[in-house]
Image (cartoon, rainbow, N blue to C red):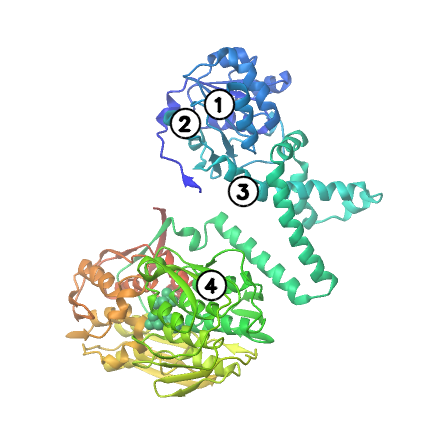
Amino acid sequence: MTSAAPASTPRVLEHTDSILIIGLGMIGASIAAGLKAQGFKGRILASDACHDELEVGRSMGIIDAFGSIEAMGREADLIVVCVPVLAVEQVLRALTPVWHDALVLTDVGSTKAAVRESVCRVFGHVPDNVVLGHPIAGSEKSGVKAANPTLYANHNVILTPEATNRSEAFELVASLWQRLGAQVLSMSVEHHDDVLARTSHLPHFLAFSLVDTLARQDERLEIFQYAAGGFRDFTRIAGSDPVMWRDVFMANKTAVLDALDEFEQGVARLRCAVESSDGDAMLSIFSRASHARHYFETLLNQSSYQSMEQRSITYRAQAGGAVEGRIRVPGDKSMSHRAIMLGALADGVTQVDGFLEGEDSLATLQAFREMGVAIEGPDQGRVVIHGVGLHGLKKPDGPLYVGNSGTAMRLFAGLLAGQEFDTELTGDASLTKRPMGRVVDPLRLMGAHIESAEGGRPPLTIRGGQALKGIDYELPMASAQVKSCVLLAGLYADGETRVTEPAPTRDHTERMLNGFGFAVDKQGPVATLHGGGTLRGGPIDVPADISSAAFFLVAASITPNADLVLEHVGINPTRVGVINILKAMGADITLENQHEVGGEPVADLHVRHARLKGIDIPEDQVPLAIDEFPVLFIAAANAEGMTRLRGAEELRVKESDRIQAMADGMAVLGIEHTVVDDGIDIVGGKYGGGVVDSLGDHRIAMAFAVAALNASETISIRDCANVATSFPNFLELAERLGMRISAEESDE
Ligand SMILES: O=C(O)C1=C[C@@H](OP(=O)(O)O)[C@@H](O)[C@H](O)C1
Ligand SMILES: C=C(OP(=O)(O)O)C(=O)O
């Protein structure tokens, strides 16, 4: 396990008079240069077999003195060994005459078990003042002249402390790296060597080997002459220091060979795909790799929501603003999830247009890639899925991570219960708190083997190879996710699966299954299907998401002079609660250009400012507007009189407890309200600004951003990174319409 290092005080390094760097190559010299650049007040000493390098180091002003290991070691408080891994032992032996307890020693070797063995051979054990480490930063350049004072800034440094290490020794070494701008992590020696074998040693192995192989060929000059970007990018690291890398491969032989075995299996799979001209298999491998590489890039740039779990985005929504124009909000989230799922399980190709490129639906897409489905895109909302058929999914290598998405976890639970292989479903911190018993119960009735964590929470582990049987299930709550979960499991079940819902909920699963040629019979509240059969891929047009449009429906309704058209919005009757409720409150919304695309009704929604009045929200509208309540509460705060909501206890188990999260924020703004178990009363009137917390819930964040249009002061909304799960370009569209919201980033 990796863990963040205990915070250490930079003072520790300040109390260090002399740091000795043994081995003044690029790595050691960059430490020296970085310390000087950071204004380190102590002396920097160096020792190296090459006298010329030391002279250069002194003339560059990055070291203060140099000499033999023994002479310099006598003066040092902290020693950093920067020699190739196999030379460490010799260095340690040279230090033994001047070794004392107050010294602290660390190293930078790329493999840790071998260095630890060297330490043990010299001292008989790892002394409590020796803390081994490895900066994950480097360059193919070598020598003191390649010193780079910022080499370690914003890079990880892994320390591999022993249980017996003195804490001040660990803290001193950590503070050295932190002073150079690095982030310090700690893990075991074994784990370090395993991880590095895959992420560093194997790529170096391949680069050295490829360049060597090409260089042996007679026409090498010609090959290199024509080699372009691909060759350059792939082989840059083949220019690295040969001695250092010989030592790495000698020292980490077992882990490297294991990594190589895995790699050879991967090469064999790809080779087989090429040999048999299996385009789908190639596409599957390339698209999975390409996506993983892009994801890695977002981690490096810290630009994805998932990599931002540690960071915080605050929205500052200025009071006032306009809502005017014509926009299309992103694709429907519910339909985007389902389009990928059914497209993957279908025979043939499914082309999806209007796909929501939000973190939730992207996580679903990636999960299918991990189960061997070739998926092209997304590219401007277009995704092409090469379906593998109901029984064509492959066992993923690890757990399937579905991020923040309740929909994904519950629908996946149903379809994975019918697979031949075992799976585990995990999600982010918010999802891990949400109830899954509601899908585990019916799936067990169908014969599934499925376990949840305590209290029916994620992760879910699902044992494959179970014979499922159809059930007749009455949903205990109005939930499209649970209904869809049971229907998807029903595809794999023997006989008839029948689900009865207590109130109508979104019916995209039923509609889309019919669209894929898989019959679902719908009689009032009862949906029925028969297991077996096949799905047929085809084109899907995903309309704009009414749940995202809802923010602007309310924004325009409450803003004087507003006039807005929201294009191509899905107006499936099971989703239009927000329009019905707003109209009942007096909103001016007209549906223009109504037509049908792929079995789903759509329209352009034209909305203008209107005077809203409070109402008792009809309970039958609650499931039809379930995701829109946060922003409907803001409509209520801007209406004359009281709006009363009941029968909405489901709001308490969304990404946050949405009744409480909204109530807390409204209290800050001075909006009068009373909370009850299953709802809230809200009294409209004037309100102010302040700092509210979205609790990491996208819809709470966007609702308060809309509230600012009529607030008397700025509203600051904390923890908004999660907006990217459902509405990645919310700020851009809001700004285009005349709303004034800025985003500020900070580390938590
Ligand atoms: O099936 C779906 O796509 C969804 C169903 C609803 O959840 P419940 O089924 O839990 O009500 C909704 O809140 C969610 O955003 C999407
Ligand atoms: C509740 C929501 O989504 P999910 O349940 O998929 O997390 C939502 O988007 O408001």
Give the alpha-carbon distance from disc 3 to disc 4, as whole Å. 28 Å
Give the spatial CA distance, label 3 vs label 2: 23 Å
For the residues labelled 4 and 2, the Cα–Cα distance comes to 42 Å
Q: Nearer the viewer, residue 560 or 482?
A: 482
Judged by depth in the image, the label closer to the viewer, 3 or 4, is 4
Labels 2 & 1 near each other (Cβ < 8 A):
yes
Question: Closer to the observer: label 4 or label 2?
Answer: 4
Q: Is residue 517 above or below residue 149?
A: below
Q: Residues within 10 Å of mark 4 (few under 14, many from 20)?
A: some
Q: Earlier in the sequence, mark 2 or mark 1?
A: 1
**Residue 195 numbered tag:** 3
Task: Please indicate whether residue 136 sits to the left or right of residue 680 in the image.
Answer: right
- Residue 670: give x, y in percent of width and height: 16, 61
Q: Amino acid at mark 1?
A: His
Using the numbered discs, state the Cα–Cα distance from disc 1 to disc 4 in whole angstroms: 45 Å
Asked which secondary structure carries label 3, the reply is helix
Mark 2 — residue? 164
Q: Which mark is residue 463?
A: 4
Query: Percent position (x, y) of residue 170?
Result: 41, 28
Q: Position of residue 362 (x, y in %)?
A: 48, 63
For the residue labelled by badge 1, is the local secondary structure a helix, a strand or a loop?
loop
- Distance, label 2 to label 1, CA atoms, is 10 Å
Residue type at tag 2: Thr
Circle 4: residue type = Arg
Residue 327 appears in view: no
